[in-house]
Image (cartoon, rainbow, N blue to C red):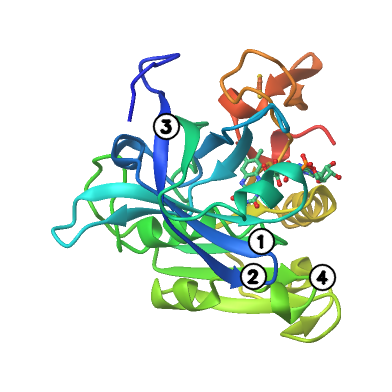
Amino acid sequence: MASMNPSPQVVQGLVSILEQKSLARDTYLLRLEAPLIGQMIRPGQFVMLRLLGGNDPLLARPFALYDTVLDDQGRVIGIDIVYLVVGKATSRLAQLRAGDTVEIWGPLGNGFPEPAGPHVVLVAGGIGQTPFLAHVRELLGGRGYAGAAVRRRAESVRLCYGVRTQAYAAGVEQFLAAGAEVLLASNDGTIGHHGFVTDLLETLPRPDHVFGCGPEPMLRELAQIANRQRLRCHLSLETPMACGVGICYSCAVAIKTDAGWDYRRVCVDGPVFDAAQLHW
Ligand SMILES: Cc1cc2nc3c(=O)[nH]c(=O)nc-3n(C[C@H](O)[C@H](O)[C@H](O)COP(=O)(O)OP(=O)(O)OC[C@H]3O[C@@H](n4cnc5c(N)ncnc54)[C@H](O)[C@@H]3O)c2cc1C
Ligand code: FES
């Protein structure tokens, strides 16, 4: 990988695709040979991926770390991302194969904070489960990231995962294998609870910390539940981004401040924010 760093912490270059495989309807796992980023990245951080060979789309797209990839000796050799095909970039990405090359820069963003206590609930909607596999492994002491020692940070992790319909449920076996309890919900009742994923949270014992990722209406509802129940809650935002490194301001969100509210850039100040700080 070339090293043309826009900042000392960010690696930029061309990387090879090691594997691309289908996980669920319109949902793919992309394995990238990116050892430098893999050694530095933490759960909750993301990378920007840009397609080569044309200007359509011109801009890179952000994707969360799904997990790091280790070789037989436990050395980090790359990263996995998991993505849903929604538009131009993800449609073209789905046509790439092992040996093809993409441009990448990362690791980017702040990552998840330490949990406030031993019982953690993760709430994911749509493709919002992607930042949580590495998070589960880190919380339960399954894997270390960015050179940090492997240690158990939580006693229990429950993943509440909502999908449109059963065919979109991706990676459930991996979450179970990582030690999470998984509760599913679907819009059409084809799997799990028939209804909103946020309904599941209300059926669980009170957690010490809730983390959420998914569509904005789901995050807004989650923030309201957390506020009502006085739960510690952090949300990972999926705001569209152009540069990923704080230059273009395309990712600005409103945050409460002492003076009222102000803008923050999701790519450098987030993507993970305290739910109580977000000004919806
Ligand atoms: C920090 C971060 C991490 C992300 N991680 C993942 C991930 O792990 N897996 C994954 O599949 N996606 C992830 N996303 C979202 C992903 O970046 C978009 O789905 C992607 O940019 C779509 O590109 P596209 O060219 O295929 O679609 P486009 O052609 O750009 O858009 C297609 C349609 O989707 C809408 N759209 C595009 N992006 C978003 C968005 N972020 N929110 C709401 N609507 C949108 C557009 O308005 C349009 O209607 C993440 C986003 C952020 C900010
Ligand atoms: S994406 Fe450019 S400033 Fe955040």
Q: Quadrant of the N terminus?
A: top left
The amino acid pointed to by label 1 is: Ala
Residue 260 falls left or right of residue 200? right
Tell me the distance, in whole angstroms, between the alpha carbons under discs 2 and 3: 35 Å
Q: Which mark is residue 14?
A: 3
Please tell me which residue is depicted at 39% across the width and 68% down the height of the picture. Answer: 155
Q: Which mark is residue 160?
A: 2
Pair 3/4: label in front:
3
The amino acid pointed to by label 4 is: Phe
The answer to whether mark 1 and mark 2 are in CB contact below 8 A is yes
Q: Which residue is mark 1?
A: 124
The answer to whether mark 2 and mark 3 are in CB contact below 8 A is no
Residue 208 falls left or right of residue 146? right
The answer to whether mark 1 and mark 3 are in CB contact below 8 A is no
Tell me the distance, in whole angstroms, between the alpha carbons under discs 3 and 4: 40 Å
Q: Secondary structure at mark 3?
A: strand
Q: Secondary structure at mark 1?
A: strand
Please tell me whether residue 40 is drawn above or below residue 117 in the rendered image: above
